[in-house]
Amino acid sequence: MKKLNITINFDMDGTIADLYGVENWLEMLIAEDTTPYAEAEPLLRLCSLARVLNRLQRNGYNLAVISWLSKSGTEEYNEAVTAVKMAWLKKHLPSVAWDRITIVPYGTPKQNFCENPLDILFDDEARNRDNWTGIAYDVQNIMEILKNL
């Protein structure tokens, strides 16, 4: 299959993983506890999401994750958070062969990873969507949007 050179990018926290639904998530992050990242429940039916993503990838789309680390944290904590986020993706979306997973310091401009004006970003944060130089969507109707690609 010919690559389309279009990447569908997903934020994690608040977009596909319910980090903010974990009780005491903020206190745990401040204490450099990775538990909220590990315990975050999926915000979508991930088996359905995986099927759609695999179809899109077979049809030439690239699949990527762009996720921020915690606002503050030591280098060791950031490494631990990265490992937990990678494990979350492997656990919840094992059949998805991501073309790129980028976990970067909090506040890193996500538009730095937009390589094509047709690249898509799903993100719960308005600032990231507003600054994205491709096509950006909030977390509403992710499945419907993907099914229409």
Image: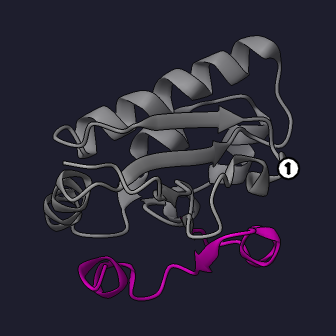
The picture quadrant where one finds residue 44 is bottom left
Q: Amino acid at mark 1?
A: Gly
Q: Residue at x 32, y 76 (%)?
A: 146
Residue 34 image position (x, y, % from top left): 58, 31
Q: Residue at x 38, y 57 (%)?
A: 4
The picture quadrant where one finds residue 79 is top right
Residue most extreme to the front:
2
Q: Residue at x 86, y 35 (%)?
A: 72
Residue 36 image position (x, y, % from top left): 53, 44
Residue 32 drawn in magenta: no
Looking at the image, residue 17 sits to the left or right of residue 82; the answer is: left
Residue stretch rendered in magenta on the structure:
121-149
Looking at the image, residue 91 sits to the left or right of residue 7; the answer is: left
Residue 32 image position (x, y, % from top left): 72, 28
Q: Is residue 131 above or below residue 64?
A: below
Quarter that holds the C terminus: bottom left
Viewer-proximal residue among 148 and 144 = 148
Q: Which residue is mark 1?
A: 107
> Mark 1 falls on what kind of element?
loop
Looking at the image, residue 127 sits to the left or right of residue 80; the answer is: right
